Image (tube, rainbow, N blue to C red):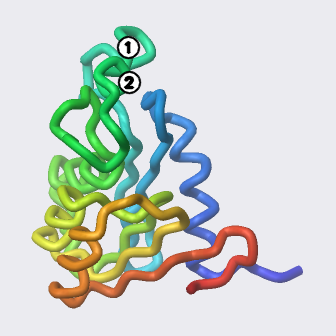
Amino acid sequence: MKRPSWDEYFVEMLYVVKKRSTCLRRQVAAIIVKDKRMIASGYNGAPTGLFHCGQVGCIREQQGIPSGEKHELCRGIHAEQNAIIQSAMHGVSVKNSTIYITHSPCVLCAKMIINAGISRIVYTGNYPDELSQELLQEAGIVVDSFNKIDNVLI
């Protein structure tokens, strides 16, 4: 029996976490890992206690906002943001951790990842945000694309 690598293991978990997403457009998950232990997870959706888009409709769809633009016009909070906030709420440092994400981060999440001290990102799908990539490179954060089909880091 072949055991999965640590990256394979945590990437596989993303596909369970993203099932909790309440976004009508794109289901995204994030897991923060430190010392080979999952310390937080997050998925995209409305803040705690607020109505989900499935209940009240998607503002972005209603206004025809394309993916990657006007992030502030959305009821939802991103998976990466939820995972970082969850860590903060429970007093768990994410400094020098790895964040696994189903999509490469947007610029808002990239800035949060940088300031949170996360040192590595592993993502499985692309998100259209060139500024995010530039900032992460400038910050010296290791960014790895994980090809889910072949289980290979690219």
Horizontal side of 114 relative to 26 (left or right) equals left
Q: Position of residue 128 (x, y in %)?
A: 38, 60
The quarter in which the C terminus is drawn is bottom right
The quarter in which the N terminus is drawn is bottom right
Q: Residue 115 occupies which quadrant of the picture? A: bottom left
SS for tag 2?
Answer: helix
**According to the image, label 1 marks what residue?**
57
Horizontal side of 88 relative to 31 (left or right) equals left
SS for tag 1?
Answer: loop
Circle 1 packing at 10 Å, graded few (<14), some (14-19), many (20+), is some
**According to the image, label 2 marks what residue?**
61
Given the current orientation, which residue lies at the most extreme left position?
115
Q: Position of residue 143 (x, y in %)?
A: 38, 82
Give the amino acid type for the residue marked by disc 1 in the picture. Answer: Gly
Task: Please determine whether, in this image, residue 54 is positioned above or below residue 121.
Answer: above
At 25% from the left and 18% from the top, the residue drawn is 49
At 47% from the left and 34% from the top, the residue drawn is 25
At 63% from the left and 74% from the top, the residue drawn is 147
